[in-house]
């Protein structure tokens, strides 16, 4: 299998929340998109692993994914272990993505930032010939970091997801176990109505940066090459 884009995420629903609109948009453009979830989210207060797996598969369909799989690392236990990096690297070799999306390397939840860190190292390991892995070496051409969970980080670029926003919301809503009908739980688990407002206001915030209605933010570590500075797609004033 050769993917154009692979999102590596700590928990099912992270991709949907952080870069789902972008993944949907790339699928609509004809690219083969995939998600590698590192854990099944079994430590979450609500739901359980089999239920979240079903939800993830439904959400994957809503995003138009060509592929989705789970590595079943322990939830709340994504650690800086060589064993984990090799497991991820093995999947990168098998899926051969051109672009990889990782969560930003800092943040509140250790699983999220550790996924960003070990995901980066796994991309490197996957390209080395002399590591104990099966298959041909493969190194992704580009690594992008999604900064949605760390809104204080200024993005390198924002993807306009205005046309994909409703689909993104539908994909998130596939995780029915994560939305609370109870008022007292709504700080941790938003209701469906509240979700639209939360997801919408963040997307609006990043959209405003590029003069679009809704956007999703990314950071790149590498400097981007530019040939034509007249037609740079920056926000018009
Ligand atoms: Zn998460």
Image (cartoon, rainbow, N blue to C red):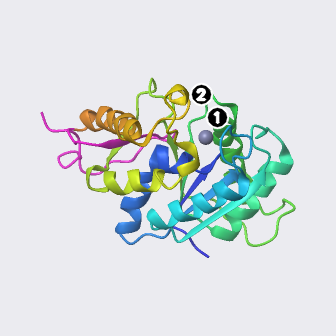
Name which residue lies at 58% across and 64% down: 57
1 or 2: tag closer to the N-terminus:
2
| Farthest left residue in view | 237
Q: Quadrant of the N terminus?
A: bottom right
Magenta stretch?
Answer: 211-237
Viewer-side residue, 24 vs 144: 24
How crowded pointer 2 is (Cα within 10 Å; few <14, some 14-19, many 20+) is rated as some
Q: Nearer the viewer, residue 220 or 184?
A: 184
Residue 187 marker: none
Of residues 226 and 217, the one drawn nearer to the viewer in this rendering? 217
Position of residue 35 measured from the top left corner of the image (x, y, whole percent): 58, 59
Percent position of residue 97, x then y: 57, 64
Q: Tell me if mark 1 has few (under 14), some (14-19) or many (20+) residues whose alpha carbon lies within 10 angstroms of its own.
A: many
Q: Residue furthest top?
A: 152
Say if the magenta span includes residue 194.
Answer: no
Relative side of 100 to 82, left or right: left
- Is ligand 1 within 8 Å of the beta carbon of the residue shown at mark 2? no
Q: Is residue 38 left or right of residue 178?
A: right
Look at the numbered discs 1 and 2 and tell me whether their residues touch, using CB distance below 8 Å.
Answer: yes
Q: Is residue 14 above or below residue 58?
A: above
Q: Mark 2 = which residue?
A: 107
Label the magenta part by its dominant secondary structure.
loop
Q: Secondary structure at mark 2?
A: loop
The total of numbered circles placed on residues is 2
Res. 113 mark: 1
Q: Residue furthest bottom?
A: 1
């Amino acid at each position: 299998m050769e993917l154009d884009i692979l999102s590596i995420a700590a928990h099912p629903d992270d991709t949907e929340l952080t870069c789902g609109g972008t993944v949907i948009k790339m699928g609509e453009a004809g690219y083969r998109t995939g998600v590698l979830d590192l854990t099944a989210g079994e430590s979450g207060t609500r739901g359980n692993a089999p239920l979240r797996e079903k939800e993830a598969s439904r959400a994957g369909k809503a995003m138009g994914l060509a592929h989705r799989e789970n590595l079943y690392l322990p939830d709340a236990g994504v650690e800086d272990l060589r064993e984990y990096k090799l497991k991820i690297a093995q999947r990168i070799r098998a899926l051969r993505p051109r672009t990889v999306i990782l969560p930003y390397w800092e943040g509140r939840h250790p699983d999220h930032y550790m996924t960003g860190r070990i995901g980066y190292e796994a991309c490197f390991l996957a390209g080395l010939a002399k590591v104990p892995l099966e298959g041909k070496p493969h190194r992704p051409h580009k690594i992008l970091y999604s900064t949605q969970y760390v809104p204080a980080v200024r993005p390198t670029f924002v993807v306009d997801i205005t046309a994909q926003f409703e689909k993104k919301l539908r994909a998130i809503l596939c995780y029915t176990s994560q939305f609370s009908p109870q008022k007292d739980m709504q700080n941790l688990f938003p209701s469906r109505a509240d979700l639209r407002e939360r997801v919408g206001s963040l997307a609006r915030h990043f959209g405003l940066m590029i003069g679009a209605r809704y956007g999703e933010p990314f950071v790149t570590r590498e400097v981007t090459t530019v040939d034509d500075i007249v037609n740079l797609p920056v926000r018009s004033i």
